[in-house]
Amino acid sequence: MKLDSSVAAVVTGGASGLGAATARALAAKGVKVAIFDLQEEKGKALAAEIGGVFCEVNVTSDESVDAGFAKAREAHGQERILVNCAGTGNAVKTASRAKEDGSIRHFPLAAFDWVIQINLVGTFRCIAKSAAGMLTLDPMEDGERGAIVNTASVAAEDGQIGQAAYSASKGGVVGMTLPIARDLMGEAIRVNTILPGIFDTPLLGAAPQNVRDALAASVPFPKRLGQPDEYAKLALCMIENGYFNGEDVRLDGAIRMAPR
């Protein structure tokens, strides 16, 4: 897909981290970018920086997502690109004993469902609604209608202790990539997924330096945290390379996560 000012994109979770880097990279190519996020201040600031539009969107809500797409399309027209970066996580053992008194507890099901609703169902909600919109477009010169990039995690394949919900949600994103690519193959819409390793995002930015150093040292090579612009470069490769379809690609410096 040729990226220029005739193309519109939506980036969920686009106000910070991997999403923000991708929004900037797309805008640098001339693409008109809409940012979906709940972080209003950051989202509006980034939209102003890149000449895009901010849409306050909760990916767990049909109404919120519909309103976001309506606002984005009013500003830029129907998007040909969707990049799903909105996500969250938690860490709770499936069942455990409290250190204080030995009482037994299990993973709160509401907390499990919360992660699934954001990471997995939220991703699919945005894919389905964006793809339906893409079907209204005529194909471009290269025959394509659109391209979708999702964000999973290396935890989809080697989740750590306490990551049952997170790994299940990201494993679901990986698992649905090929079926969705097959669903949309007759409509010339490609679908791919990135599985990032340990990246220097705002979540890790709050960690103590010794923790950051230890995480960086655990990466085989290069021994550092991944940079958001490296994610963005792979996302753009998946979008621009017309033969990239139905793939799940780790971006992790060859790391394989230990149990803890």
Image (cartoon, grey):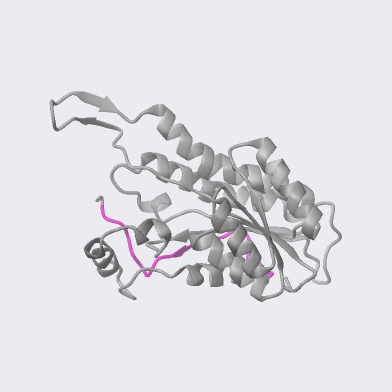
In the drawing, does residue 37 fall left or right of residue 170?
A: right
In the depicted structure, whether residue 8 falls above or below residue 120: below
Magenta highlight on residue 253: yes
Residue 147, position as x, y percentages in the image:
69, 61
Magenta highlight on residue 121: no
Q: Which is more toward the observer, 185 or 151?
A: 151
Q: Which is more toward the observer, 160 or 5?
A: 5
Residue pictured at 81% horizontal, 53% vertical: 74
Q: Which is more toward the observer, 227 or 166?
A: 227
Residue 238, can we see it? no
In the drawing, does residue 50 fall left or right of residue 15?
A: right
Please report the bounds of the magenta region as a residue range.
242-258
> Dividing the picture into quarters, in which one does residue 97 lie?
top left
Farthest residue, direction right: 138
In the depicted structure, whether residue 109 falls above or below residue 90: above
Residue 184, can we see it? yes
Residue pictured at 76% horizontal, 47% vertical: 70
Q: Quadrant of the N terminus?
A: bottom right
Residue 90, position as x, y percentages in the image:
37, 42
Residue pictured at 65% horizontal, 46% vertical: 126
Residue 211, position as x, y percentages in the image:
24, 61
